[in-house]
Amino acid sequence: MYNFFVSEAARGGDVYFITGADHNHIKNVLRMHAGNTILVSENGASHLCEIIDITETAVTAKIIEENYNETELPIKIYLFQGLPKSDKMELIIQKAVELGVYAVVPVEMHRSVVKLDEKKKESRRQRWQAIAESAAKQSKRNVIPEVCDVLSYKQAMAKAAELDVFLVPYENEKGMLATKEALEKITRGASVGILIGPEGGFEPKEVAEAAQAGGMPISLGARILRAETAAIASVGMCMLHAEMNL
């Protein structure tokens, strides 16, 4: 079943009026018609709807069942991702959204290969946001996770310090025991930050600054992971903990 995101302004009583690109997609790409059912997500909730009319300007869909599909995690995961090469960032965002991340925060780090000027930062962010929206539709999310503005490392650490739990996948002497202990600190409703370095990894100074912001070093296992693999594994680990235990 296809999922579409709308604003509150699109609702009138028990019907939605879908316009713009989604109208075109429903009418001309999917070639749907009256009687077809779709999911319509608004303000964090997804409703089962039946298409009752398709005109040249709008799709009218009537709500059959409210709050039909609950797919959001009971925690909010913020992925702080050190800027990798563009194609890798796109993969990370796509998979992180599928796994339930709440927001992605791109971070400029010392060993980031990619260096963006202000104009490129905004154009990339818009591209990344479009990928997040597409992934949210595909995975039947109730919300579209935000891809935040690119932050400096100092700005990112200030934001991470405000969260309930802040995880830093990095070598540590306690191995997977540290990971288990850190996951046990995550409770229902918690905000959880995950910091992933770029291709070149962390500078020692960055690890120290993360610790000052409350970051807890954890292990992702005995193998060395690429940046994109570490991001997906970390978010997946928190997703499984939340789904299984919270």
Image (spheres, helix red, strand yellow):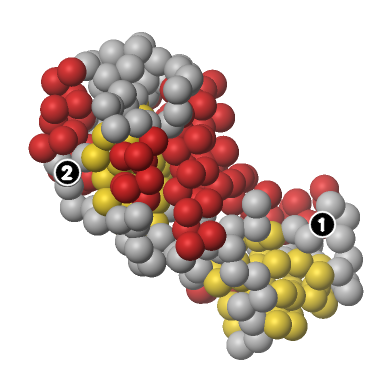
Instruction: Identify whether 46 is placed above or below 123.
Output: below
Label number found at residue 214: 2
Please give the residue where the numbered disc 1 appears in the rendered image. Answer: 27
Look at 50% across and 68% down and name the residue there: 44
- Between residues 106 and 202, which one lies in front from this camera angle? 202
Is any atom of residue 90 visible in this view?
A: no
In the picture as drawn, the residue positioned furthest to the bottom comes out as 13
Instruction: Identify whether 109 is placed above or below 146.
Output: above
Q: State the SS at label 2.
A: loop
**Res 81 → quadrant:** top left
Q: Amino acid at mark 1?
A: Lys
Q: Could you tell whether 161 is left or right of 86 in the image?
A: left
Q: Quadrant of the N terminus?
A: bottom right
Q: State the SS at label 1.
A: helix
Look at 55% across and 47% down and name the residue there: 99
Q: Residues within 10 Å of mark 2 (few under 14, many from 20)?
A: some
Q: CA distance from mark 2 to mark 1?
A: 50 Å
Q: Picture coordinates of residue 33 (x, y %)?
A: 88, 66
Q: Residues within 10 Å of mark 1 (few under 14, many from 20)?
A: some
- Between residues 9 and 176, which one lies in front from this camera angle? 176
